[in-house]
Every structure is written in C-alpha cells, then in structure tokens.
Image (tube, rainbow, N blue to C red):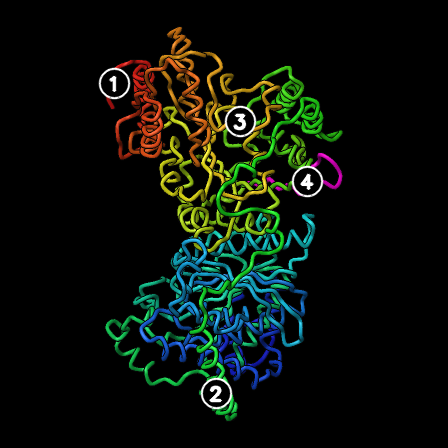
Amino acid sequence: MNRLNPKISGPDAEEARRIYSSTIGADFMHLAQPERRRWIAERMESQAPPSDRHLILARLVRADLFEQVLQSRYLGTKRFSLEGVTSLIPLLDAILDAAGEHGAIESVMAMSHRGRLNVMVHTACKTPHEVVAGFEDVDPRSVLGAGDVKYHVGATGAFVTAHGKEIEIHLVSNPSHLEAVDPVAVGRARAKLMRYQGGEPGFDTNKVVPIVMHGDAAFAGQGIFAETLNFADLAAYTVGGTIQIIVNNLIGFTTRPVQEHSARFAADLAKRQNVPVFHVNAEDPDAVVRVGQIAADYRATFASDVVVDLIGYRRHGHSEVDDPTITQPLLYERIKNHPPLWKLYAERVKVDAAKTVAAVRAEYEVEQTKAQQVKKIPHLRQLPDYWSAFHRGKFRPEYEVETGLSPEKIGELTDSLVRVPEGFNVHPKIVKLLEQRAEMGHGKRAFDYGFAEAVAFASLLDSGTPLRLTGQDTQRGTFNQRHAVLVDTRTEETYVPLANLAPGQPFCEIFNSPLSEAGCLGFEYGFSRDYPEALVLWEAQFGDFVNGAQVIIDQFISAGEDKWDLPSGVVLLLPHGFEGQGPEHSSARMERFLQLAAEENIQICQPSNAAQYFHMLRRQALRPWRKPLIVFTPKSMLRHPDASSKLEDFARPQFLSVVPDSEVTDAKHILIASGKVGHELKAERRKRKDPTTAILFLDQLYPLPKPEITAAISAHPNAREVVWVQEEPRNMGAFFYVMPRLNQLCQDLEISLRSVKRSSSASPATGSAKAHELEQKTLLSLAFTTTSGD
C-alpha cells in the first residue's frame, strides 16, 4: 500500500491508517507528477460521498441470484461464476455513472470468461433469457458460422446511468486466451474515438471509455497485457486511458498467488509505468463504489490508465465442474460456509432484503422459462451501422472493382508525393530518391515497390479512403524502401507527404510501433473492426516476427468471422524470401496461414511486381468486401529491375491472381512459382536461352484461383508438364497446399505434374550464405530438368 511521505502534512497516523490501510489501499507515490499524487491524496483523504445503499444492495442481489439460479438449473454446466467478486457489478455501475458525467457515449469492454454472463445481463443490459438461452438445447443451425461457447461471445447493449444518460456498451468477443483481447479492445476504442472526431487529431477521449477486466493470474502472467499497457502514452495508440480492473480471486485455476507472481500484488506489474493502482476489498461495496468513481474521475482528469484491484474470492472451482477441495481443501472449507455478499451487505446497512430477493428470484424464474422456449441462439451483439456498406461471408465476383489509374492521375499524385514544404531540409539521399520517384510517376523510370505503394496509398486517400499503417520501423521501412515520413536534417521535424495531399483529405496515420507483435497486431485488428472504411495495415519488421502474434492470428484474424460473425479488413505485410540471411529472417511461415485458410476466411497473396502490389492494395480498400489480407512482401526484390513495373501496368483494370508469361507463348514446360524464386527462374531461363519454358507467377495463393491457373496452363497446348517450384523446404511454404490442388487441375488437363523444393527441414533456412547459394543453384537447375519424380 502507499507509504505516506512524513513531510506531507495530513491526518495523524491513526487517521492515515484508517484511510490508506483499511478496505482501500492506493499505490501512487511512484507517479512522476506531483499534481497527480496530490489529486489522489486529496480524494483519498476527503470525506467519501454518500452512496445509494439500496441500489447497491439491489445490484448485489441481482448479481448473486443470477449465478445461484444458473447453478441450480444447470448444475454441472460451465458458466465461470462471478460469485465471490459480485461487487464487480456495482463497481462497473460507479465507473459508468462517473464516465457519463464526463461525456461518455460508448464504452468498449473486454474480459475473460469469469463473470461474463453476469456482465452481459447487468452492464450490457441484455435480457437474462437471451443470455441463458445458450444453456438450452436450441437448433444448432441457428449458430452463426461455427459459433462459440456462451462465455466467449460478445454483446452490445445500452447502460443507463444514475443520471439518466445512455452509454452504448460493446463487450468484445474473446477466446480463452484471456489477455489476448486487451489490445483488440483498445484498438476498437481508438477507432471509435476517431470516428467521433471525423478522423481529425485531438479527439475527445472522454467520449469512449475502454474498460478491461482481468483475472489476477492472467494480469501478472500474460505478457500481452504489458505490451498493451505500454501503449498508454504513445501517440499512435493513445485512447485517453484505459480503466483496468483485476477481478482478483486470489487463485488461478488451481494455483495460489505464491506460485503466480513474485510481487506482493498481482497488480504490481502496472507500477512499471505512470499508473496508479487502487486495491479494494470486494466485500466492502461502499468502498468499491468509491474507488470506481475515483478511477473514472482520474482517467477523465489526466487521460491516464488506472488500475482497480478488486480483491475477493472464487465460490466454485475454476469452472463449476471442478472440485476445488482437491487442491485447496482448507480454503474451500471456509468459502463453503461464507455467506454471499448481498447477505453481508444487507446486515451491514441494516436493510431487510427479503422482498428484493423474492422479486428478483421470481423474475429470473420467468426469464429461465422464456429461455426454454427460445428456438434459435439470440444475437447478443449487433454490428455498428458503418458495417452496413460492406459484404461479409463468401467471396463473390461482383465484389471486384477496377483498380487501374490513368497515367495523368498517377502524374498528379506523384507531384504531390515528391513535394516538400519550403525551407524543409531534406536529406541528400532522399532528395535523390524524390527525383527518381518523380521520374517513375511520369513514365521516365520503372516503378519500384516503395513508390508503387506510395501511389496506391495516395490514390486511396485522394478518393476518400483513410489510411493507417503501423509497424516496427515502418515510417522509413525496414529495407530503406518506404520513406513515408521525411525528417528535416537540421531540426528533426517530420513531414508526411501522404498526409498533405489536399485540404480536407481523410486521416493518414503512419507510425513506428513499439517492439511488439501480439499487442500491436491485436490493436490494428481492433481498429479495423471499427473503421472498415479505412485501409488498416500492420507490417512486421521481418516476416518471421509474426510468430510473436500467432494467438491474434489464430483466435481473431482467421477465425473471428466464423466464430462470432465479426469481419475485419486488416492487412498484414510480412517480408518473406530466402536470401542467405539465415533461418530467422527468411520465412514468414506461409504454411501456417495456408493451414488456417478455409471457408474464404482470409486472403493470402504474394505480389510478384510493383504494379501487382499497387493493384492488390487498391483492391483491398475499394471493393465492398472485408476479409483480412495476408501479404508476403519482398526484400531483395523491392528495387530489383525484374520486379519493377512500367507506368502503363498501373492502368491495367485489375490485380492478376495469376501472372502469365509474356515472353514464351508456346511452351513445352510450365513452371509455376510464387514470389522471388519466380524472378530467379526467369533469370536462369535467360542464362540458359531457353525458349520452351513458360514461367507463371501465382500471386494469389488463397482463395486459390483455379480457373485462372487452368486458363494460364491451357494457353500452352503443347506443354508436357507443369512444375511447382518453391524455395521453401517441402514441409513449409505452399507445397502441401498447392500440390494436391494443382494435381487435380493437371489430371483434368491430362498433363503431368512434379515439384522442386528444398528437402524437409526443422529450420526454415541455412545459416550459411554459401550453402544457401549452392542450394539455390541446385533448385533452379532441377526446375529446368525434364526428369520426373517428386
């Protein structure tokens, strides 16, 4: 708890203990700003405002009886009861009441499964029978997509404060990966704040209040929370503070605190930052309500995170089917005989709650009867209106749009992109780059990937599409290719050409991210969920860094629409390619994304040249269809002449999922490849002066463009074989996904199929540049042989 500075005047020692060492404790002396420490001390030491004890008691009765009715009706069914910390409900009431007075219109909430059903009913204000229907044996065909268990799904509703103000509640869907939802919720809050501000900077952070609820074990143990907490004061991620609540059962599954965290409190992790922590005894509801008010006021006053450590217990085991007496027999002997909180509070405030209890119990009995009559799973949440313009579900050809631009339009955009303010001191190397880009945009030089991307972004901003791009070293680009943010060599002031194309343009945010993957990608996924009109991209410094974000990919990006009917158009840019740089920076793990691909849940592309990258980005933003897009981007090919594109390529109507061979028109052999190795195959063909081998680039891996592949092969009627060539090992890359499908196509066309690839390997690539070169030469040579075998 707080250790008072003896130099600070205040109450005597006994009074200090009453204030700071009773049922409320405060950790705030680590805060750097004296005004914040003073503010907390004054609130702690002032007289507590009177609380509405009848309302608090009624809320506790409702929260406890809700759990007890479920326990009696659905004995042995998992629901992750809130009993032991039901004061969470009046805590949320107090926070929302205070937030409403500060101007809150919406609250984005995230939590794990414990107490979720209770919060749905009492905070998101869903009717009990809608929530309880999940326990009944309803028509399984009514489940959206594959569906999810009842304690993972989200909910939307409207909470009415004590002063009559309505706050929209968005309880975020969340898997059992507990803290993985933290950055998603904060990203959603950021998007909602920007919507209220029309995309302009300086938004009023009090309009949307993010509230994230944690278990004590997860708060201390799962690193993604620390990543998310680090966002608090970063310009790219700030939301004016998140109210963090630890629903502290003093146990995690079967694990006691002494085995969970090294500090005195699970909340101590938050003290690494400039964040106050309020510990409060969950069995003093008046104190809980007071802390809720202080937390909401502190956030509104200082635009800061704040932590409320709500310390209680857990009535049942981890779930209601667990027997906790096996691992904590003494603790659960005490809990068994401990009265529910509403009874303790009723005795304390000397109120007879019998009538309230009878009325609430009767209400829940009626609601449970209604639940038995429900034939279809109710929709507990509703997508916001801004999703009405976008299709979901399976891909349809009519969703396609033309992505080409005229040379005149590209020239106009180029002039804006290479212009800098008068007096801005541009680095000499960037001066040369801007000169080269001016030549590209006016047809005097071939486009590289960096400028193709810039023109794609500029064209989208010009047509009204907002842009958000974040990642590690993204402003300059890991490979010195982007330079989206220019730095004055004398003042280090910055200038973003894309953000200064024209007055009144949509917002353009291009930020370097902290050194995080899971937290940062989760944030961008969340942002994309509430700004579907924007092109939202996250870039890995190297493609393999995406490993650190696997839980976000598995649980949200690839499965969110199927589980929860929640679409997203987030884009992942993952540098990929085997270039003799060792196993760590070769592979973006293409095979993992292909394994996750099903039911047209995501798109997976590897654009083979600059124009293809341009068309792909525009397609993603312009078509009325939102699916996550995984892009394997180049490294060595970023400025390579073989992957560059002429100005006229940008006028082509659409992205090509299969890029045909324009050099060989009647081939005997057809090589199909994706990415850098295709260009190496073309170089090898030139070296061999081979006029009989066609090379096709497969630029869209999923959904696999079967008609386009068939057409591209059929364009060579004299071809005798097709060869799939990849530089990745056999057990990686696209091999396991592409080969069975190519085999079926080739059988239909009565043409043979073989493959060339590295041998299966536990590691993506060799650490020796010389070994890599030897392997690559062998791979290219085998691709041009006519011997069969696989």
Report the residue marked by disc 2: 357
Whether residue 509 is in magenta: the answer is yes
Side of 99 where 559 appears, left or right: left
Of 116 and 421, which appears nearest the observer? 116
The residue tagged 1 is: 788
N-term-proximal mark, 1 vs 4:
4
Q: Earlier in the sequence, mark 3 or mark 4?
A: 4
Q: Provide residue 346's location: percent of width, then percent of height.
A: 49, 89
The part of the chain drawn in magenta is 499-512
Is residue 757 in the magenta section? no
Give the class, few, some or many, for how many residues have Cα within 10 Å of label 2's Cα (few <14, many ≥20): some
The vertical placement of 18 against 352, above or below, is above
Q: Nearer the viewer, mark 1 or mark 3?
A: 1
Question: In 3D space, how far apart are the residues under numbered discs 1 and 4 (Cα atoms)?
Answer: 53 Å
Query: Residue 87's x, y, as percent?
Result: 48, 76
Alpha carbon of mark 2 to alpha carbon of mark 1: how far?
79 Å
Task: Label 4, secondary structure: give it.
Answer: loop
- On the image, the x and y values in percent for residue 118 come to 47, 72
Give the CA distance from mark 3 to mark 2.
66 Å
Q: CA distance from mark 3 to mark 4?
A: 22 Å
**Residue at the location (34% across, 20% down)?**
722
Q: Amino acid at mark 3?
A: Gln
**Identity of the residue drawn at 48% across and 29% down:** 657
* Other residues around mark 3 within 10 Å, as few (<14) / some (14–19) / many (≥20): many
Label 3 with label 2: CB-CB less than 8 Å: no
Q: Indicate the secondary structure of the residue bearing disc 1.
A: loop
Identify which residue is drawn at 62% across, 42% down.
Answer: 509
The answer to the question of whether label 1 and label 4 lie on touching residues, with beta carbons closer than 8 A, is no
Q: Residue 311: where, in percent of width, then height?
A: 43, 73
Residue 317, quarter of the rendered image: bottom left
Q: Mark 4 sits on what residue?
A: 464
